[in-house]
Image (cartoon, rainbow, N blue to C red):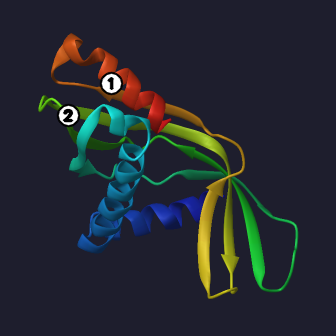
Amino acid sequence: MGALNATFAWIWREVGNSAGVRRWAVRKLSAELEELQGGTLGRFFSVLSLHSLTLGVTLPKITGLTLGEERSSEVVDILLDLDYEGELAFTIAAETHTRHAALLSVTVAGVKGRGRLQFSSKPYPHWSFSFVAPPVLDLRVESPGGKALSHVTTLIASQVS
């Protein structure tokens, strides 16, 4: 695994902070915030938007790698044991229905779990990633607003994790 992790680490150092990668990450996180706002958080917040993003310094380390069960020649499943400690961080600008605004800092300090990387050619060539079971997540949600918003940070943390 060492050679594979070193290769990915080198690629991340070269392109991890590029405009294309940042655009992709912003688009994905913004879509997740829209989905959260459409659920429970939408009852409390009229606006949830991405304010800032730091992609972290490393990618997840692959600690195990196996080929999944062969289903057909059109689908390849790779099972990965992942361990991430890269400090991905982002800030959410939130506004309540009563026009109170807050910034919430979210740091993904660690993620550990087994994932499935799937390559498929049906209905069109694509790939996807998902965790096989819920991962162990070290998530920190803080508000520069302090104690007054502690209930908001708890709510956000429970919805994100």
Locate residue 128: give its quadrant: bottom right
- Give neighbour class at mark 2: few <14, some 14-19, many 20+ (Cα, 10 Å): few
Write the residue at 33% across / 24% down. 153
> Mark 2 near mark 1, Cβ–Cβ under 8 Å?
no
Which residue occupies the foreground of this view, 59 or 156?
Answer: 156
- Mark nearest the camera among 2 and 1 is 2
Q: Residue at x 16, y 24 (%)?
A: 144
Can you say whether 73 is above or below 118 in the image? below
- Is 52 displayed left or right of 57 in the figure? left
Q: Which residue is the site of mark 1?
A: 153
70 sits to left or right of 49: right
Who is closer to the viewer here, 147 or 63? Answer: 147
Amino acid type of the residue tagged 1 in the rendering: Thr
Q: Nearer the viewer, residue 33 or 3?
A: 33
- Give the image location of residue 23, x and y in percent: 28, 68
Residue matched to label 2: 97
Q: Earlier in the sequence, mark 2 or mark 1?
A: 2
Query: Is residue 139 rendered to the left or right of residue 49?
Result: right
Q: Secondary structure at mark 2?
A: loop
Displayed quadrant of residue 1: bottom right
Q: Residue at x 39, y 61 (%)?
A: 28
Specify the farthest residue to the top: 147
Q: Is residue 47 above or below residue 64?
A: above
Locate residue 30, reporting x and y percent. 32, 56
Could you tell me how far apart the alpha carbons at marks 2 and 1 are, in whole angstroms?
A: 17 Å
Name which residue type carries label 2: His
Residue 161 appears left or right of 24:
right
Tag 1: Cα neighbours inside 10 Å, few (<14), some, or many (≥20)?
Answer: many
- Nearer to us in this view, 104 or 96: 96
Q: Quadrant of residue 72?
A: bottom right
Asked if residue 45 is positioned above or below residue 82 in the image, the reply reads above
